[in-house]
């Protein structure tokens, strides 16, 4: 049977493959500590679970509007207006099953074949994959360790051409935990405005900023009409399995996103939306406790990593990832690259991490090797996992 050619253009998210490998090893009785998957190890806050159950009992079990339930979109509009300091209307909000469809919809709705889209590298793999899928050119923007995993403005300027239609940004960032500064955002805004470019701002980690305040590009003058803001419930409220995300954009674009939703997912589960409403309007206590715990773990894992010979790790400002430089360790163990180190750590130390190259090919002239660890793991597992890594790489 024939598979469509375009499927060759679509990539994957290696984290899910590693997760399958880890589960297979665990099933054979192997003791594996995993830092591979990017989801909170906390339960969804209890008030949100209760709201979900209540809405199921109240009959929120049917189709809903493709764009999302009005009371929920009103709540999102209030939340975004409050947190980003701009006026958002419910007509500018589209609800999706998880934040990921927002990436798909943004590129499908805004990008033509042959257009160019700039995206962060290393970065969340879906960006590059979907850009390629629609026949556009994916233009990686290197994130640099020496700049705390921000980009060099000069390089960004050079990457913009007449065909650039969109810049994707993600701050706090997956996989590096890096955060763009206000000056970076201003620079992107000014380039986007002068070159008439969309900005897709992936703000899914906006509540996980540990030193200082979160800033969104949509708050800058002239940016609301050209920004697609993506946010969701997976990380902030530990709701990965519920599938709940949303986008904020110009209302005409929102109508186009709604048509994409009608033609693909139909709608987002309505009881999930009612649970999300409680997330935004109800007690933030459990979510805030989780985020405080992530900060403690960040400090802990950075210290433990820097205590291993051959590993150096910058302290990231947000999300729940660290992205240590493991070049020396690879050299010492005669491993070709971080992919081989990922394999070595899984089989020799019983620790699952992801190679930097799971988040995009190496940038030109890049000589360093990195791995990503998610510290959405208990303190006990962080301590034991890091002990195992130290033993396996220092022996
Ligand atoms: N954007 C980034 C940067 C992510 O890291 C993730 C999930 O890992 C998503 C979007 C997708 O989130 P969701 O699970 O809500 O689809």
Image (spheres, grey):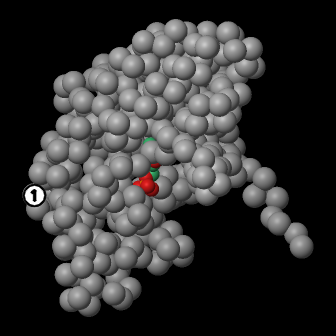
Mark 1 and ligand 1: say if the CB distance to the nearest ligand atom is below 8 Å. no
Q: Secondary structure at mark 1?
A: loop
Q: Within 10 angstroms of label 1, few (less than 14), some, or many (20 or more) residues?
A: some
Report if residue 393 is visible in the image: yes
Q: Is residue 334 above or below residue 19?
A: above
Q: Identify the image quadrant of the C terminus.
A: top right
Residue 100's x, y, as percent? 47, 55
Query: Which of 311 and 260 lies nearest the eye of the viewer?
Result: 311
Residue 296's x, y, as percent? 24, 30
Residue at mark 1: 283
Which residue is drawn at the image coordinates 48% and 13% (left, top)? 308
Residue 298 shown left or right of residue 333 in the figure: left
Q: Is residue 224 above or below residue 337?
A: below
Which residue is drawn at the image coordinates 43% and 31% (left, top)? 384
Residue 254's x, y, as percent? 38, 62
Residue at the front extreme, as displayed? 29
Residue 351 shown left or right of residue 63 in the figure: right
Residue 130 shown left or right of residue 308 in the figure: right
Residue 161's x, y, as percent? 60, 28
């Amino acid at each position: 049977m024939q598979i469509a050619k375009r499927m060759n253009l679509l990539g994957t998210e290696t984290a899910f493959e590693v997760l399958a490998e880890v589960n297979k090893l665990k099933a054979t009785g192997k003791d594996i500590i995993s830092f591979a998957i990017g989801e909170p190890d906390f339960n969804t806050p209890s008030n949100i679970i209760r709201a979900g159950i209540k809405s199921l009992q109240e009959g929120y079990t049917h189709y809903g509007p493709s764009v999302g339930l009005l009371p929920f979109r009103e709540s999102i509009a209030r939340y975004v207006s409050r947190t980003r300091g701009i006026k958002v209307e419910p007509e500018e909000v589209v609800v999706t099953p998880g934040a990921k469809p927002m990436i798909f919809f943004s590129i499908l709705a805004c990008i033509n074949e042959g257009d160019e889209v700039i995206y962060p590298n290393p970065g969340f793999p879906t960006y590059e994959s979907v850009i390629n899928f629609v026949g556009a050119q994916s233009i990686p923007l290197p994130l640099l360790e020496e700049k705390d995993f921000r980009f060099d403005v000069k390089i960004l300027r050079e990457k913009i051409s007449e065909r650039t239609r969109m810049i994707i940004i993600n701050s706090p960032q997956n996989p590096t935990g890096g955060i763009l500064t206000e000056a970076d955002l201003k620079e992107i805004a000014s380039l986007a405005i002068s070159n008439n470019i969309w900005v897709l701002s992936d703000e899914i980690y906006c509540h996980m900023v540990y030193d200082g305040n979160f800033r969104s590009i949509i708050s800058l003058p002239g940016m609301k009409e050209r920004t697609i803001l993506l946010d969701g419930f997976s990380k902030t409220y530990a709701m990965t399995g519920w599938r709940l995300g949303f986008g904020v954009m110009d209302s005409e674009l929102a109508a186009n996103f709604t048509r994409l939703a009608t033609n693909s997912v139909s709608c987002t589960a309505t009881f999930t939306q009612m649970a999300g409403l409680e997330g935004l309007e109800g007690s933030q206590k459990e979510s805030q406790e989780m985020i405080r715990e992530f900060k403690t773990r960040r400090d802990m894992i950075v210290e433990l990593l820097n205590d291993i010979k051959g590993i150096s790790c910058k302290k990231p400002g947000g999300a729940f990832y660290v992205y240590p430089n493991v070049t020396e360790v690879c050299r010492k163990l005669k491993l070709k690259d971080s992919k081989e180190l990922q394999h070595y750590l899984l089989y020799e130390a019983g620790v699952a991490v992801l190679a930097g190259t799971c988040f995009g090919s190496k940038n030109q002239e890049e000589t360093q090797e990195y791995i990503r660890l998610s510290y959405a793991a208990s303190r006990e597992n962080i301590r034991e996992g890091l002990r195992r890594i130290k033993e396996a790489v220092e022996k």
